[in-house]
Image (cartoon, rainbow, N blue to C red):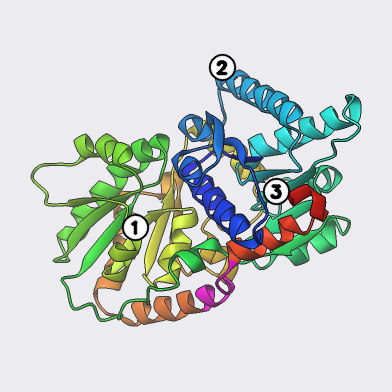
Amino acid sequence: MLVAGEPSGDQLAAELVTALRAAADGRSLRFFGAGGERMAAAGVDLALDLTRHSVIGIPSLREVRRFQGFRDDLVALARAETPAVVVGVDFFGFNGSLARHVRDAVQSGPFLNWNPKLVQYVSPQVWASRPGRARQIAKIHDLLLSILPFEKEWYARHTPSLRVEFVGHPLVDRHAAAQAPSRQPTVAPTLVLLPGSRRGELVRHVPVMLDAARRLQKTVKARFRWVLPSESLAEFVRPMLPTDFPMELQVGELSEALQTATAALACTGTVTLECAWFGVPTVTLYKTNALTYAIGRRIVTVPYLTMPNLLAQAPVMPEFVQDAATPEALAGALGPYFANSIARSQAIEALGRVRAQLGTPGASHRAAQAILGLLPPAAVG
């Protein structure tokens, strides 16, 4: 059973299913659960498309109740199907609760022959806020699959009883065949704009990113290319874009866009690691509602939101959060990257060091081997 609740997790779960089949050595495996289009295309029997319901920040009471209903339905499905393994893929706010309720169902119910292994694929960022959550993961889960290099050592210090395996980052496989572009682009200077993958992010990020691009245009002759992960999100953004300012709007093909990019302006998140992989100097931003930001300031203990900055332990991508994310600040930080300056060369060199930390190709394969290793031969035959 696999459960993913966001587009990125849906893709990761689909890649894992493909790797599990390849590693099964002819043995028959069945997959079911909740996710999205990519999991369905990979052959997962979906009871629910969770990716349609992802939320940003603090959910409303109505949203909480809706997700509780989804969780209870999936627990009931697990009890009916008795899978050998339950894999939560990212989306830990939901998947952590699901794992706990599955564990409770095993301990309290009459299922003496059902004792599933519980796996979390992608660690929640407990090292960034509320580290006490690590103890709950250790209490409930049999295996945590990490995609960031420092996490295994962090868990070893805080919860040594939890088995943690660093499998590498999946983007290494996705872009293994693509080479980082020449840092002297032969095409016109291009700014790639990456506002996020959820509608709430787009509402907050597109206007300020657009204003920053307008300011940059006054001093830099450049192309501007928005890249959205789906057609539905592109259609959502299209009415926000002006008709008097030439801009491209692209769906998918992020690697192609980054290979020809001079710089990027991106929402903090996984996409910043892809920018780092391709050696694209990047400025990042994040804006959320006031309540979520106020709570976040109290509980987040790391100095950066942008993952390459955390890996480098330095601001290799200038980061602007909440009120600091103004058009003036963003345009000002982007300007040096179009001047072929020392700042640009230094950024590219620093991003190369980040890229080296992401591991070698084969993340999904290593994750699949670790999961299959939890099972006795009869469980997969």
**How many neighbours does mark 1 have within 10 angstroms: few (below 14), some (14-19), or many (20 or more)?**
many
Determine which residue is flagged by label 3.
120
Task: Assess disc 3: are there few (<14), some (14-19) or many (≥20) residues with their C-alpha within 10 Å of its C-alpha.
Answer: many
* Left or right of residue 54, residue 339 in this image: left
Crowd tier of the residue under label 2, counting other residues whose Cα lies within 10 Å: few below 14, some 14–19, many 20 or above: few
Q: Which mark is residue 62?
A: 2
Q: CA distance from mark 2 to mark 1?
A: 34 Å
Residue 162, label in figure: none
* Residue located 66% across and 22% down the image: 73
Q: Magenta segment: does it hold 232? A: no
Asked if residue 131 shows in the view, the reply is no
The residue depicted at 83 percent of the width and 47 percent of the height is 135
Q: Secondary structure at mark 1?
A: strand
Would you say the residues marked 3 and 2 are in contact, meaning their CB atoms lie under 8 Å apart? no
Q: Which region of the structure is painted magenta?
A: 353-362
Q: Main secondary structure of the magenta part?
A: loop
Amino acid bearing label 3: Gln
Q: Is residue 307 left or right of residue 96?
A: left
Please give the label number shown on residue 265: 1
Kind of residue at disc 2: Arg
Secondary structure beneath disc 2? helix
**Which residue occupies the extreme left position in the image?**
244
